[in-house]
Image (tube, helix red, strand yellow):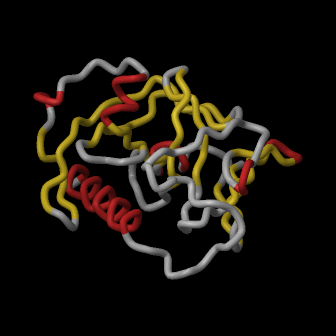
Amino acid sequence: MGKPLLMMILAGGLIGLMLPSGKSHPAGPSPIDPRGVIPSYHIGTAPGGGGNSRAPGGETRLERMGNGHFYADASVNGQPVHLVVDTGASTVALTVADAQRIGIPFSEGDFDVIGSGASGPVRGKLISLDSVDVDGKDVRNVRGAILEGLDVSLLGQSYLSQIGGVQMSGDQMVLR
């Protein structure tokens, strides 16, 4: 039962990323420019209303971007990765490019169908990440996946459920 549930949650998260939010957010640019480039944000700064910003009490405040999503900069296995926070995803899901860049050993020939989404079968590989750290909130031995065709890596529940809490209010998300 665990694998089908994981796939349903991943599929739901992917569908959510593809659907427009229906809400206009004039403050701050979309994190993806027309060329498909995702800007790099650094902890402690919030250029254009995005990225991680440390607040009192060890909280990390994330601002909703123009496309309706929240993004965070993390250290995954000691390497920087820019992710969309996806509370509907059961695991941390990495793009093929992010997984290669941070040195996770895999071959796309190892990919199997691990779920289904709106556009059909979802292919990838289930993995375990040594560590995921967002602004000092470090979690070890995190369940994850490398997904074929994913455009931006996802920060899912295998990380979010292990930190002190996640709260969303309006256009702000707080990680504790």
18 left or right of 47 in image: left
Picture coordinates of residue 35, whole percent (x, y) = 44, 49
Picture coordinates of residue 142, whole percent (x, y) = 44, 34
Q: Nearer the viewer, residue 84 or 88?
A: 84
Q: Quadrant of residue 119?
A: bottom left
Q: Quadrant of the N terminus?
A: bottom left
Q: Nearer the viewer, residue 57 or 65?
A: 65
In the rendered image, the residue lying farthest to the front is: 35
Q: Nearer the viewer, residue 82 or 30?
A: 30
- The answer to whether residue 57 is above or below residue 129 is below
In the rendered image, the residue lying farthest to the bottom is: 22
Residue at 22%, 36% in the rendered image: 125
- The answer to whether residue 160 is above or below residue 103 is below
Residue at 69%, 36% in the rendered image: 42
Residue at 22%, 50% in the rendered image: 3
Residue at 40%, 31% in the rendered image: 98
Q: Quadrant of residue 139?
A: top right
Picture coordinates of residue 20, whole percent (x, y) = 44, 74
Picture coordinates of residue 31, whole percent (x, y) = 56, 54
